């Protein structure tokens, strides 16, 4: 990551903890990890081969001083300690040759204070104490020689500054972008953006950025809870949540892809956070008639999960990746900060703001990458732990997969009989053909189970539990129905929040993972999609996190897997937690009764769903 982009991102990171007071300056702490400062120091001063800084040399190289290998750390008394290796040579010129008198190497240590430069645009440093020692630990050079060395060392180190003008300009630009149409007060706000102080601890430097907020109206254009949204408000609603979903997906996919090779566990956790964000979105869509702002709550809940995880793992990254890693943290903190400030400044988390924030993180990101799209994304599937391609296993996969997908034989394809698919398509069961219908659906589900068995992802010990799980889930979600009759038409079974078909696969939660047309129109595709999700939650969540060992009951993994299927990754243990809401308990208890009925009666148990 170019160093010039970093201060903007550091500024954004600090906004998360900003406090607003009426008539009072807004102070924003910006935390600078010492690895960041050291990287900047190396780029500016130690830019020679192998991190060297040539302080002095004569024309023959007879006399020279070279610093190398800078190591920066904070002290408990608010100073910075910089240790560098020093190699010095002294001699005298004899004709065109050099008569070398001495060669010395050791370590120079300086204690420095950080302060805001006179022009207010940079972080500067002054040396308050310095010392030198030889490689053997002794001083090693006479006092006069050390004074001569210090004449070169100290000014060079004090000449280093960390230019924060990009931070200030980035702050102004971001506020201008987030406050479209504001009156002249915004000009005063932008002019007031400044650096107001710096604090040094043993862990980091904290630079304070300040601005004088204008007196902006506190009113926000919001619909009161319980009001029905107008068509215009619904359109804004849709635009807002789609912009959020597109940005969150891009951000977490970028993070996960970047970290996949170095930290697969962190990548897995990021994938779970993305799914949690989308389950939150599903719940928000279910409640859209309440007129509540969709984006703020969605962003807050996601960032509250993401930020602690990123901060916990910040030291896991090598120093060479510290800038990029911090940039990701900063982008999330910036969004959180914008939300916190919106009530006071009228800031809005909309597509323009998300696009601007994304481009602060990655200037080269294009609009297409931030667009809301329902197309299947192989990279997103990989991030979530699925095979990049997905088909229905009937031989008609080219209808639903990406272009030329039929040239590749996906490893997970299940042997679904195309004639069975044709028979089930558009079939809404009646009392007279219920037995035939349920038998046909059972054949479909058994073919899916057979294909999954062949893949070997589910451990043999849990195969019977898995088989009961998929049958019970399809029962719980839809009574084994893909279609319903409504107004004289046969339509795919849909919920108000966008869950479709026999497995009620939610099109918002699984956007980019499955083809929405196929989820609606192809019962085999829908069954396999739901199966893939269930297996993922069963194996990668319930079994991996040892739910069966916690409870002492192997069937607990089925209860945990369904809880996640219904509510998202953090719902894993809700079936056994006393604080679970009554509504969720009813859902979990209903599933468990169905699971037990499947265990006892097999597919015939589903007839109870159609009892008069």
Image: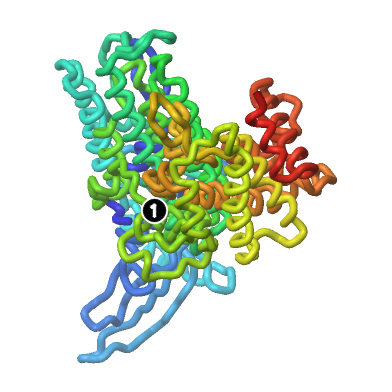
Res 78 seen here: no
Locate residue 575: give its quadrant.
top right
Image side of residue 21 versus residue 314, left or right: left
> Number of callouts in the render?
1
Residue 592's spot in the image, x, y percent?
73, 35
Q: Residue at x 45, y 69 (%)?
A: 409
46 lies left or right of 514: left
Residue 457 place in picture, x, y as percent: 63, 61
Compared with 324, 337 (above or below) is above
Q: Secondary structure at mark 1?
A: helix
**What residue is rendered at 26% in x and 85% in y?**
93
Q: Which residue is mark 1?
A: 324
Query: Is 7 drawn above or below residue 345 in the view shown?
Result: below
Looking at this view, name the residue that lies furthest to the right.
552
Q: Residue at x 43, y 54 (%)?
A: 322
> Which residue is painted at 71% across and 36% down in the image?
594
Which quarter of the rendering shows the N terminus?
Answer: bottom left
Q: Position of residue 223 (x, y in %)?
A: 35, 11
Q: Nearer the viewer, residue 2 or 157?
A: 2
């Amino acid at each position: 990551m170019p160093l010039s982009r970093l201060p903007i991102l550091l500024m954004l990171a600090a906004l998360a903890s900003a406090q607003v007071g009426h008539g009072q300056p807004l102070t924003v702490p910006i935390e600078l990890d010492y690895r960041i400062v050291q990287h900047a120091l190396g780029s500016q001063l130690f830019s020679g081969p192998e991190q060297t800084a040539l302080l002095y040399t004569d024309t023959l190289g007879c006399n020279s001083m070279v610093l190398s290998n800078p190591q920066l750390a904070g002290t408990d008394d608010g100073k910075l300690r910089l240790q560098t290796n020093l190699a010095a040579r002294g001699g005298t010129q004899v004709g065109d040759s050099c008569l070398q008198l001495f060669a010395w190497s050791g370590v120079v240590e300086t204690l420095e204070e950080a302060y805001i430069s006179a022009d207010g645009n940079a972080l500067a440093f002054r040396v308050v104490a310095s010392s030198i020692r030889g490689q053997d630990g002794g001083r090693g050079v006479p006092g006069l020689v050390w004074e001569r060395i210090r004449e070169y060392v100290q000014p060079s180190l004090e000449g280093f500054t960390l230019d924060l003008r990009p931070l200030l300009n980035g702050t102004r630009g971001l506020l201008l972008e987030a406050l479209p149409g504001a009156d002249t007060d915004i000009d005063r706000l932008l002019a007031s953006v400044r650096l107001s102080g710096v604090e040094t601890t043993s862990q980091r430097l904290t630079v304070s950025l300040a601005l004088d907020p204008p007196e902006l109206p506190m009113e926000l254009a919001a619909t009161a809870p319980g009001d029905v949204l107008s068509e215009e408000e619904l359109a804004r609603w849709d635009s807002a949540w789609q912009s959020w979903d597109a940005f969150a997906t891009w951000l977490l996919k970028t993070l996960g892809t970047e970290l996949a090779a170095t930290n697969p566990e962190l990548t897995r956790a990021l994938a779970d956070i993305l799914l949690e964000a989308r389950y939150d979105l599903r719940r928000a869509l279910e409640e859209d008639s309440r007129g509540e702002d969709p984006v703020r709550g969605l962003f807050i809940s996601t960032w509250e999960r993401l930020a602690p995880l990123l901060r916990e793992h910040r030291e896991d990254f090598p120093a060479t990746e510290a800038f990029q890693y911090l940039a990701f943290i900063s982008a999330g903190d910036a969004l959180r900060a914008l939300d916190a400030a919106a009530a006071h400044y009228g800031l809005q988390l909309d597509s323009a703001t998300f696009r601007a924030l994304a481009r602060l993180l990655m200037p080269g990101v294009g609009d297409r990458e931030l667009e809301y799209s329902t197309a299947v994304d192989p990279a997103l599937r990989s991030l979530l732990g699925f095979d990049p391609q997905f088909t229905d296993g009937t031989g008609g996969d080219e209808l639903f997969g990406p272009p030329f997908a039929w040239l590749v034989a996906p490893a997970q394809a299940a042997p679904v009989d195309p004639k069975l698919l044709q028979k089930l398509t558009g079939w809404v069961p009646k009392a007279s053909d219920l037995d035939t219908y349920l038998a046909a659906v059972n054949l479909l589900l058994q073919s899916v189970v057979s294909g999954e068995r062949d893949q070997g992802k589910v451990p043999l010990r849990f195969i019977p539990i898995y088989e009961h799980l998929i049958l019970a889930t399809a029962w719980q979600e839809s009574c084994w129905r893909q279609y319903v009759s409504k107004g004289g038409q046969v339509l795919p079974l849909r919920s108000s929040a966008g869950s479709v078909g026999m497995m009620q696969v939610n099109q918002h939660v699984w956007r980019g993972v499955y083809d929405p047309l196929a989820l609606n129109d192809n019962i085999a595709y829908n069954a396999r999609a739901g199966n893939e999700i269930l297996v993922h939650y069963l194996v990668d969540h319930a079994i991996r996190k040892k739910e069966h060992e916690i409870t002492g009951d192997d069937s607990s993994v089925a209860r945990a897997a369904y809880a996640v299927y219904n509510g998202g990754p953090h719902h894993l243990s809700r079936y056994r937690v006393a604080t679970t809401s009554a509504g969720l308990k009813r859902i979990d208890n209903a599933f468990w009764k169905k699971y037990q009925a499947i265990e006892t009666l097999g597919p015939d148990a589903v007839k109870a769903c159609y009892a008069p």
